Amino acid sequence: MDDKLLRYTLRVDRLLFQKFRYIAESEGRLANKEIEQYLKKRVAEYEAANGKIEINHKLFGRAIERIARYFYLASLSRSHLRCHCSNSFKTVSQTCLFV
């Protein structure tokens, strides 16, 4: 997986998303790419009004990685999830999510 791509679960009203998907398809895009275009547009608008947003990757990189891992692990069934820690297997409830 590309380190630059973040997986994020979006919870939204089903009818609203169906309408959004219709708009995306009329633009010749998948819904995911249409969301990406909206995000780019919003960031550009914000930076034009408030100045460039500087991200310290050393400071935030690890935090973003942990958040992404947490949401990925939370999406799996906890009863079946296993984590390898210290050469022994433990359920997630017995160990931390941020390995």
Image (tube, rainbow, N blue to C red):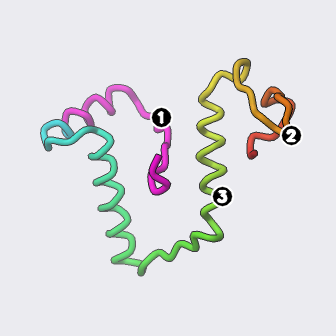
Residue ID at (25%, 34%):
21
Residue ID at (47%, 46%):
1
Query: Going by the image, does 17 lie left or right of 51?
Result: left
Query: Going by the image, does 73 lie left or right of 85?
Result: left
Q: Which mark is residue 30?
A: none
Q: Position of residue 14 (x, y in %)?
A: 37, 26
Q: Which residues are magenta?
A: 1-22
Q: Position of residue 40 (x, y in %)?
A: 33, 60
Mark 2 residue crowding within 10 angstroms, few (<14) / some (14–19) / many (20+): few
Q: Amino acid at mark 3?
A: Ala
Q: Amino acid at mark 1?
A: Arg
Q: Which mark is residue 63?
A: 3
Give the residue at mark 2: 86
Determine whether 15 is above or below 61 in the image: above
Asked which quadrant contains residue 96, the reply is top right
Q: Which mark is residue 11?
A: 1
43 or 92, nearer to the observer: 92
Q: Amino acid at mark 2?
A: Ser
